[in-house]
Amino acid sequence: MDALRMLEEFPSQFSAVECQTLNPEDYKGIVFSGMGGSGIVGDFMRLFLKPSVPVLSVRGYDLPSFVDRDWLLVCTSYSGNTEETISTLQEGLKKGARAVCISSGGRLMEMAKRENLPHLPIPQGYPPRYALGFMLSTLMCLFGMSAEVENIKANLESNKEKIKTKAQEVAKSMFTYLPIVYGTPLTETVAFRWKTQINENAKTLCYNAFLPEMHHNEVVGLDNPHIRNLCAFVLLYDPEDHTRNIKRVEITQHIFKELGIVLKVLVGEGNSLIERLLYLTYLGDWLSLYLADLYGQDPIPVRVIDFIKKSLI
Ligand code: PA5
């Protein structure tokens, strides 16, 4: 399936899956483990779950030392063969943590079978970053959020054409510039998804910074006109962000206006934070495809990632 078709069908990936549900409160904490296109789902879940226990999203080989047998480890790898994620599963098993695996197959599925762990399958045949909806729906259903999954689908389907039009406009503004995507505590994950989709689909660099931290450093860097004039700036925020961060969005707009720089400020549409975040995510996915087209790039292959994975064998 080509990239355009996968993205057209992205809303339908949000479909409730049958699985046994877990109650976050049954654990001392929850740690999501995954890399790249399979790692971002843990960041989303950290925002979506609001339990009274800690929820972490880790990217790398090691688990935090405090994770023990009373924690739940959720390992997500689309291929099932990502060595960092497998390493955390091995470590988690040594610590006696309870674990759940999500993959389209690979070693993660084999290890789950061998260790008698729950394994939730994802449809095969997609590049990992194009399977975000499948992975996220599975995780949400695992934690009893199937109603929200259906709401995301309806919201994306009804706003698809509007999202595509906006994405085209933003992509044009980024063409031949270095995209800089700013976020807030609520939109940080989406801003990072924009960065990684622009990197992998459009094959170009892109950077992030986040409020309120960027008000303590990044903003000073805007002083340099030689560099700022090479960049295209976007800021994503949500109406549910902390009121002081919303005030900071307004201050940021003012700073940009004074400097005579364009800052596109975007908010998602939807009845809940989850719907709005997926709206912005879909917008970023589309714009990365339009940007790929402007640069004459095929969005699918990620040769250097494949090279690195092979070099590590
Ligand atoms: O988009 C990609 O291809 C990567 O970011 C992968 O998701 C990442 O390398 C991890 O692989 P996997 O998703 O198979 O665990």
Image (cartoon, rainbow, N blue to C red):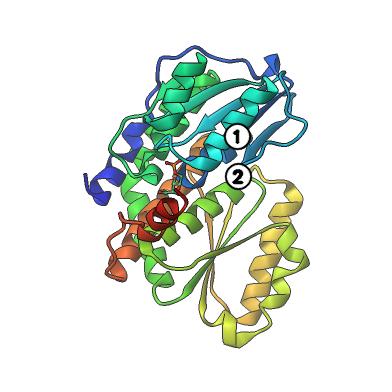
Q: Residues within 10 Å of mark 1 (few under 14, many from 20)?
A: many
In this picture, residue 204 sits left or right of residue 253 = left
Q: Which residue is mark 2?
A: 60
Residue 163, disc: none
Q: Quadrant of the N terminus?
A: top left
Q: Amino acid at mark 2?
A: Gly
Viewer can see residue 272: no
Q: Amino acid at mark 1?
A: Thr
Give the percent coordinates (x, y) of residue 133: 40, 36
Image quadrant, ligand 1: top left
Q: Residues within 10 Å of mark 2 (few under 14, many from 20)?
A: some
For this rendering, which residue is in front, 145 or 125? 125
* Number of numbered discs visible in the structure rendering: 2
Is the shortest distance between ligand 1 and the CB of mark 1 under 8 Å?
Answer: no
For this rendering, which residue is in front, 278 or 95? 95
Give the percent coordinates (x, y) of residue 191: 55, 54
In this picture, residue 142 sits left or right of residue 291 = right
Q: Residue at x 63, y 38 (%)?
A: 57
Identify the secondary structure beneath mark 1: helix
Asked if disc 2 and disc 1 are in contact, CB closer than 8 Å, the reply is: yes
Q: Is residue 233 above or below residue 210?
A: below
Identify the secondary structure beneath mark 2: loop
Is the shortest distance between ligand 1 and the CB of mark 2 under 8 Å?
Answer: no
For this rendering, which residue is in front, 60 or 238? 60
Task: Kindly give the residue lying farthest to the front in the view shown.
Answer: 313
Q: Residue at x 30, y 70 (%)?
A: 294
In this picture, residue 120 sits left or right of residue 259 = left
Q: Is residue 132 above or below residue 162?
A: above
Q: Which residue is mark 1?
A: 88
Give the percent coordinates (x, y) of residue 64: 72, 36
Mark 2–mark 1 distance (CA, rounded to whole Å): 8 Å
Q: Is residue 4 above or below residue 202?
A: above
